[in-house]
Image (cartoon, rainbow, N blue to C red):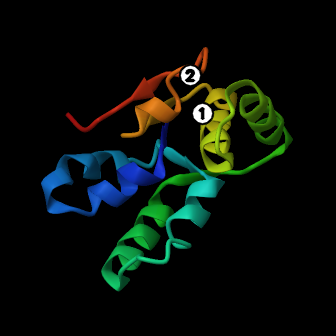
Amino acid sequence: MKIIDSNIIIYSYQSAFSSLKSLVTDTDNAISAITKVEIPGFHGLQPGEKTYCESVFSILKVQPLDDRVLDEAIRLRRAHKMKIGDSLVAATALVHSAELFTRNTIDFKNIPGLTIVNPIP
């Protein structure tokens, strides 16, 4: 399983990044529950993007923010001074022993045990 960060879903909507579609349509992959809040909650989301993202959310598993994820996110925020959303995404990947696919590798680079993949060359 791979955890797909919000930015990868957003990029996959753009024709220039169509190679990302295989990541967001693979039913073995997942998102953190925070991603399901981040993307639709973005004020600049266009109607076509909203529809696309809703279809992606119906394909990918949504990993809940259970106590294990929340405790790990708290630990990450304390240790690495992370933003709440980033800490929840990273914690989700760590708790589920999954790779994190993101373009924002800098936000996650110093977290031991977290495998980060930037699928955008």
Q: Is 4 on the left or on the right of 103, as rendered? A: right
- 15 above or below 75? below
Which amino acid does the dot numbered 1 rest on?
Ala
Which amino acid does the dot numbered 2 rest on?
Leu
User: Mark 2–mark 1 contact, CB under 8 Å?
Assistant: yes
- 37 above or below 73? below
Question: What residue is pinned by disc 1?
Answer: 93
Report x, y in % for residue 103.
36, 40
Quick one: label 1, few (<14), some, or many (20+) residues within 10 Å? many
Secondary structure at badge 1 equals helix
Q: Relative to the observer, which residue lies in front, 121 or 77?
A: 77
When asked about the image quadrant of residue 70, the answer is top right
What residue is rendered at 53% in x and 30% in y?
108
Mark 2 → mark 1, Cα distance in angstroms: 7 Å
Report x, y in % for residue 88.
67, 43
Q: Is 80 on the left or on the right of 69, as rendered? A: left
Query: In this view of the protein, can residue 1 be seen by the observer?
Result: no
Q: Relative to the observer, which residue lies in front, 30 or 92?
A: 92
Query: In this view of the protein, can residue 103 be seen by the observer?
Result: yes
Report x, y in % for residue 10.
36, 59
- 6 above or below 51? above
Among all residues in the image, which is located at the extreme bottom?
47
Among all residues in the image, which is located at the extreme front?
81
Q: Is 42 on the left or on the right of 111, as rendered? A: left
Among all residues in the image, which is located at the extreme top?
112
What residue is rendered at 45% in x and 59% in y?
59
The tag on residue 114 is 2
Secondary structure at badge 2 equals loop
Report x, y in % for residue 52.
35, 72
